[in-house]
Image (cartoon, rainbow, N blue to C red):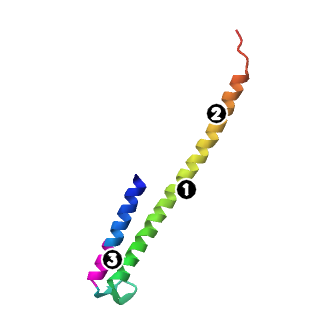
Amino acid sequence: MFRLFALFLTLFICVISVVVVYFNSNSYVVDFIIIKLTYIPVGILLFLAMIFGILISLFFLLGLIFSMRKKYKKLKKDYELINKEVQNLRRIPIQE
């Protein structure tokens, strides 16, 4: 369900960005502190902003993925150890 929602949200954002670019064909001057970009169309600005946002989100998601992978390996190792211990306990005969 989440993937379907994410797909529709992505398509909606793509359609909105195409509409914004189509109706705003003006060029703008972008002045950063270090460089000055003159007369850049809105489409390129929008594309660069989306790429920059994707890169930032991937940076944070990679940290989350690596921490989850580390936690998964630790839990898997604990599970195997507990499973071996249970198997050993099952082999021991019951003494009265």
Q: Residue at x 34, y 68 (%)?
A: 13
Q: Which numbered dot is residue 66?
A: 1
Mark 1 secondary-structure assignment: helix
Q: Splitting the image into 4 quarters, where does residue 93 fall? A: top right
**In magenta stretch: residue 19:** yes
- Judged left or right of residue 59, residue 41 is left
- Judged left or right of residue 49, residue 70 is right
Mark 3 secondary-structure assignment: helix
Magenta residue span:
16-24
Q: Splitting the image into 4 quarters, where does residue 81 fall? A: top right
Q: Residue at x 40, y 69 (%)?
A: 53
Judged by its main secondary structure, the magenta piece is helix
Query: Which of pointers 2 and 1 lies earlier in the amino acid sequence?
Result: 1
Q: Position of residue 46 (x, y in %)?
A: 35, 77
Under mark 3, the amino acid is Val
Query: Which of pointers 2 and 3 lies earlier in the amino acid sequence?
Result: 3
Mark 2–mark 1 Cα distance, whole angstroms, equals: 24 Å
Decide: few, some or many residues near mark 3? Use Cα within 10 Å; few <14, some 14-19, many ≥20: some
Under mark 2, the amino acid is Ile
Name the residue nearer the viewer: 61 or 18.
18
Per the image, the residue denoted by label 2 is 82
Under mark 1, the amino acid is Phe
Q: Which numbered dot is residue 18?
A: 3
- Residue contact between numbered discs 1 and 3, judged by CB atoms under 8 Å: no
Q: Residue at x 57, y 52 (%)?
A: 69
